[in-house]
Image (tube, rainbow, N blue to C red):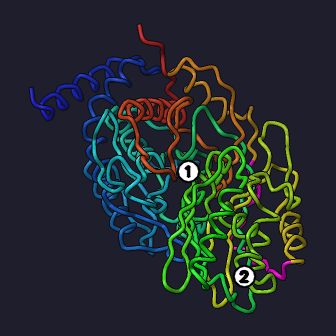
């Protein structure tokens, strides 16, 4: 039997099961069958959408690739029988099921971070390949897989023909990754903010609290350095830089010898970066190689920028770096105030709160600005140390280095009552489908849940699974896509139709 014929047969069987279920309940087997009937189409869409490089880069909030993906989402939703449209500005897509007030919302994003070094990927980062039971590519986990799962769960709910007690609204933004969430202003202006809901952009079981989020640019102006002519690294502020590079002017032999001696003596802690020195007629170039990771968990990566800054700072005299120059002061600040710390202790930003891990600080970008440098930090702090206090401590830490602070984006910590009906309902559904009795979580990441009141994060990462968002070789297992679709369908049935999920016979 062909896949197309099998899918039609499975869908018919699923709908019969749904129709035969009592009006007050859905059977778990009916939900799984309905999902299985649509799984092949969902995988095909995920592969196609991964192939669209809907990248959000710094200073690039609106790209044609992102609009192209949103149009594809709208077209697929309509083909599935769901009303959908782009909002003015073409940066947000909205898919709706049902009418009325007190809408239940699902909030996802279509944009992705840059892929980094494609050579470090097992499969092409924008190839959408299906291999080893998974769809590979940037965005497969974050957040196109959850987008697909949510859309097809809505379609399955629509096909079930259950009378809804409230409408469901899927909102697909396109500028989540750089924290410039002005795309969602179109949702507010259209009066489409849901009463409550979740973002499918984190992990199960349920996330009811998140650390604050602060992106700041540290600006070091002043004279150029006679030796350190360039120093760059990173691709996104909320990702740990896997590579960094610097070039130094002077006698290649002397500079090379000084760097080799510094590398031999370098103490990089338990996870050091690796360095490569190349001589050229005008001096030397040095590169550092680390390990990419999500900016919310910098301790899971190896920051190539901070390691290279520490190496250069340790050899500054032999290399001829001027401590008064703008690059020299930048290197000193990074080495002395950041180093290989990830909790911001030396900056005065280390803070803890019950249920949370300590603060994190990630230097995600280092770029030239005139004769100086700009370092961009991503700071995440548990409740109790607000954004104003964080900015004051950073400003104070910069004073000895003649650096300036510019706030790029900031969002205060999130907290929703873990005993609220929304959290308890979602938690119960997750437990029923997985058997995992885990408690709701507080995390260091920032999600779209901060965008609207009464929102939490609900999946789609499963405990124990590979969390590869913002890292190379990102992929989503097809079985996790299936499980996520089933959980979301059950959540929609209970919260939007008042229909609980009964255990299978």
Camera-nearest residue between 129 and 230:
230
Verify whether residue 452 appears in magenta. Answer: no
Dot 1 or dot 2: first in sequence order is: 1
The residues colored magenta run 401-414
Does residue 45 sit above or below 219 in this rendering? above
335 above or below 381? below
Where is residue 363 shown, x and y percent of the image? 68, 63
**Residue 253, picture quadrant:** bottom right
Q: Which secondary structure lies at badge 2?
A: loop
Badge 1 density bin: few <14, some 14–19, many ≥20, Cα 10 Å: few
* Image side of residue 269 versus residue 12, left or right: right
- Compared across the picture, whether 267 is left or right of 115 comes to right
Spot occupied by residue 317 in the image (x, y as percentages of width and height): 77, 76
User: Do the residues under discs 1 and 2 have CB atoms within 8 angstroms?
Assistant: no
Front position in the image: 158 or 204? 204
Residue at point 59% right, 45% down?
A: 197
Q: Is residue 97 visible?
A: no
The quarter of the rendered structure image containing the C terminus is top left
Q: Nearer the viewer, residue 266 or 79?
A: 266
Q: How many marks?
A: 2
Q: Nearer the viewer, mark 1 or mark 2?
A: 2
Measuring 55% from the left and 53% from the top, which residue is drawn there? 292
Residue holding disc 2: 320
Q: Main secondary structure of the magenta part?
A: strand
At a point 40% along the width and 40% down the height, the residue shown is 476
């Amino acid at each position: 039997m062909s896949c197309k014929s099998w899918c039609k047969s499975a869908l018919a069987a699923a709908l019969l099961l749904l129709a035969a279920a009592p009006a007050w309940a859905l059977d778990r087997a009916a939900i799984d069958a309905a999902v299985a009937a649509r799984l092949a189409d969902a995988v095909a869409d995920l592969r196609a959408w991964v192939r669209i490089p809907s990248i959000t880069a710094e200073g690039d909030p609106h790209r044609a690739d992102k609009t192209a993906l949103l149009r594809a989402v709208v077209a697929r939703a309509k083909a599935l029988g769901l009303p959908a449209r782009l909002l003015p500005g073409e940066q947000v897509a909205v898919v709706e099921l049902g009418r009325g007030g007190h809408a239940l919302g699902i909030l996802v994003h279509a944009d992705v971070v840059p892929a980094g070094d494609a050579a470090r990927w097992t499969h092409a980062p924008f190839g959408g390949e299906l291999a080893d039971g998974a769809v590979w590519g940037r965005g497969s986990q974050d957040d196109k897989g959850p987008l697909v799962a949510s859309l097809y769960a809505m379609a399955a709910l629509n096909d079930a023909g259950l009378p809804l007690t409230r409408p469901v609204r899927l909102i697909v933004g396109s500028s989540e990754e750089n924290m410039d969430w002005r795309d969602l202003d179109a949702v507010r202006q259209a009066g489409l903010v849901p009463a409550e809901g979740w973002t499918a952009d984190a992990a199960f079981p349920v996330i009811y609290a998140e650390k604050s989020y602060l992106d700041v640019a540290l600006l070091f102006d002043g004279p150029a350095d006679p030796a350190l002519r360039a120093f760059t690294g990173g691709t996104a502020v909320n990702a740990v830089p896997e590579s960094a590079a610097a070039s130094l002017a002077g006698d290649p032999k002397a500079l090379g010898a000084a760097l080799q001696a510094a590398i031999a003596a370098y103490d990089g802690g338990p996870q050091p970066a690796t360095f490569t020195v190349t001589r050229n007629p005008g001096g030397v170039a040095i590169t550092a190689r680390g390990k990419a990771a999500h900016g919310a968990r910098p301790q899971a990566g190896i920051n190539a920028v901070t390691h290279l800054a520490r190496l250069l700072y340790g050899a500054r005299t032999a290399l001829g770096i001027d401590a008064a120059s703008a690059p020299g002061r930048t290197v000193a600040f990074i080495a002395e105030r950041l180093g290989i710390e990830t909790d911001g202790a030396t900056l005065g930003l280390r803070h803890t709160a019950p249920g949370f891990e300590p603060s994190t600080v990630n230097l995600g970008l280092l770029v030239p600005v005139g004769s100086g440098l700009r370092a961009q930090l991503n700071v995440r702090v548990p409740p109790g140390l607000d954004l104003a206090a964080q900015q004051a401590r950073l400003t104070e830490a910069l004073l000895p280095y003649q650096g300036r602070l510019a706030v790029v984006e900031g969002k205060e910590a999130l907290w929703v009552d873990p005993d609220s009906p929304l959290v308890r309902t979602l938690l119960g559904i997750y437990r029923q489908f997985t058997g995992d009795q885990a408690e709701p979580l507080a995390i260091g990441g920032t999600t779209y849940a901060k965008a609207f009141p009464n929102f939490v994060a609900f999946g789609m990462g499963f405990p124990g699974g590979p969390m590869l968002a913002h890292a190379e070789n990102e992929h989503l297992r097809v079985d996790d896509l299936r499980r996520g679709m089933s959980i979301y369908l059950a959540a929609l049935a209970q919260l939007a139709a008042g229909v609980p999920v009964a255990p299978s016979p």
